[in-house]
Image: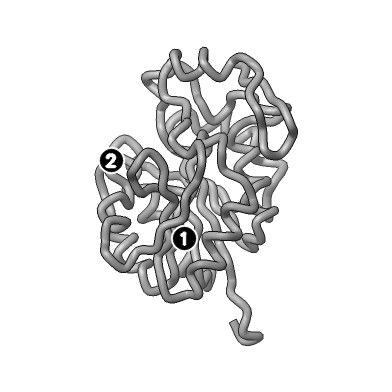
Amino acid sequence: MTDGRRHLGAVILAAGASTRLGQPKQLLQFGGETLVERMVRIAHEAGAQTVFAVLGANYQPIFRVLQPYQPELRVLLNQRWAEGMGTSIALAAAAAERHNVDDLLVLTCDQVAVTPGHLRELVAASHREHVVASTYSSRRGVPALFPEFSFHALQHLSGDRGARDLLQHDDVLQLPLPGGEIDIDTPGDLAQLSVEAPSPQRGGATIKP
């Protein structure tokens, strides 16, 4: 950008079918908002100027929830969502490049431990020189921050591993995310989080179908 500031973008990966859960996880309520709306809010609060949401399965009901957030939120439809998360990241990286984004946060909607503060720490650690991954349960993953130099590699992703392989490179920085391993993939995960759970943003929250 001409003023020397970074143009921070964020993509929320919300194209999956939630087949193991049996209902769209994107629309589960957490702390009075759906999981996908929560992540849109967190991305904006972290300083993202351009936010994308990649949809695929269950497009219509999720789009209806997100429609009020447009045009600030840009909704992308991944026609190839069934091929895996990598296609959603590739689609978002191409869109980020078109919108002159300098750094891209890659997020999923069901990691309830993610906060604006953690995302800001990812950005601060990068200095536009490094990819920065969150770490939890002895592995690297998203949320992750990808500077512009990595967009080309992101655009060539495919399959269901997402950006996992890119995050294993030796020069990738790592930032711990306590509770980052907690997500919602199965009815068991949902049942465990259906009791009151601490929320970094709201003090207490309930996940409800």
User: Where 106 sits versus 123, above or below?
Assistant: above
Mark number, residue 10: none
State the residue position of label 2: 160
Q: x and y percent of residue 127 in the render?
A: 50, 74
Check disc 1 and give the amino acid type: Leu
Disc 1 is placed on an element classified as strand
Per the model, the C-alpha gap separating discs 1 and 2 is 19 Å
Check disc 2 and give the amino acid type: Asp
Residue at (49, 62) in percent of width and height: 104
Task: Locate the N terminus and report the quarter of the image it occupies.
Answer: bottom right
Q: State if disc 2 and disc 1 touch (CB < 8 Å).
A: no
User: Where 3 sits versus 199, above or below?
Assistant: below
Q: Residues within 10 Å of mark 2 (few under 14, many from 20)?
A: some
State the residue position of label 1: 145
Q: x and y percent of residue 85 in the render?
A: 35, 43
Residue 94, visible in the rendered structure: no
Residue at (66, 61) in percent of width and height: 47
* Horizontal side, residue 70 vs residue 23: left or right: right
Q: x and y percent of residue 165 in the render?
A: 25, 53
Disc 2 is placed on an element classified as loop
Task: Locate the C terminus and report the quarter of the image it occupies.
Answer: top right
Give whichever of 32, 114 is nearer the camera. 114
Residue at (70, 46) in percent of width and height: 69
Disc 1 versus disc 2: nearer the observer: 1
Q: x and y percent of residue 72 in the render?
A: 68, 55
Which image quadrant is residue 82 in?
top left
Residue 165, visible in the rendered structure: yes
